Amino acid sequence: MLYYQMYYMERQDMKYIRDLEIMAENTRSLQLFLNLHLLRIDSKDAYMAASYMGRCAGLCNILLLLPYYFQNQVKVFPDELLEKHATRYEFLWDQIHAGKPEEKFYDIVLE
């Protein structure tokens, strides 16, 4: 699952927050869908819940791996968020490597 997430991030530029959500859902929801299938649960509500849980787990995984992404200069934030907060990746990378991230970084993460 993590290899898929890294492949997706390296191969695709994320322009919108929705792209980040789709990537997060695709990396974790498949595991939950497989568990539902193996348990022979075919409820639409269960699949919807698995989709939301997978999206949340995928986004949490991205947040946990932020130090790795910044160390390897992998672009993880959508362009939409960067434009909204008037910043660039290079500026964020420099702040993280200096050990002094500004409020813009935390605002982007919390959004």
Image (cartoon, grey):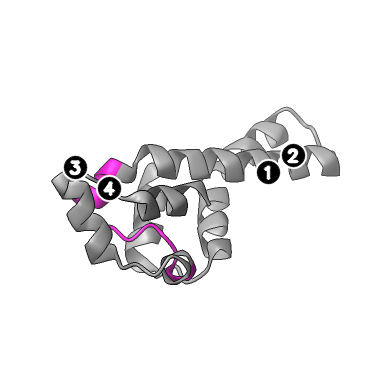
- Residue 60: % across, % down: 49, 39
- Please, is residue 30 above or below residue 41 in the view? below
CA–CA distance between discs 3 and 1?
A: 34 Å
Q: Secondary structure at mark 2?
A: helix
Q: Mark number for residue 99? A: 3
Tell whether position 75 is magenta: yes
Q: Amino acid at mark 1?
A: Tyr
Mark 1 or mark 4: name the one nearer the start of the chain. 1
Q: Mark number for residue 49? A: 2
Q: Residue at x 25, y 51 (%)?
A: 70
Instruction: Check whether the beta carbons of the residues at disc 2 and disc 1 lie within 8 A of each other.
Output: yes
Mark 3 or mark 1: name the one nearer the start of the chain. 1
Instruction: Check whether the beta carbons of the residues at disc 4 and disc 3 lie within 8 A of each other.
Output: no
Q: Mark number for residue 101? A: 4
Q: Secondary structure at mark 3?
A: loop
* Outermost residue toward the front in this view: 103
Q: Quadrant of residue 2?
A: top left
Q: Nearer the viewer, residue 93 or 58?
A: 93
**Apparent side of residue 53 relative to residue 39 in the rendered image (left or right):** left
Mark 2 or mark 3: name the one nearer the start of the chain. 2
Q: Nearer the viewer, mark 3 or mark 1?
A: 3
CA–CA distance between discs 2 and 4?
A: 35 Å
Q: Amino acid at mark 3?
A: Gly
- Residue 103: % across, % down: 37, 50
Q: Secondary structure at mark 1?
A: helix
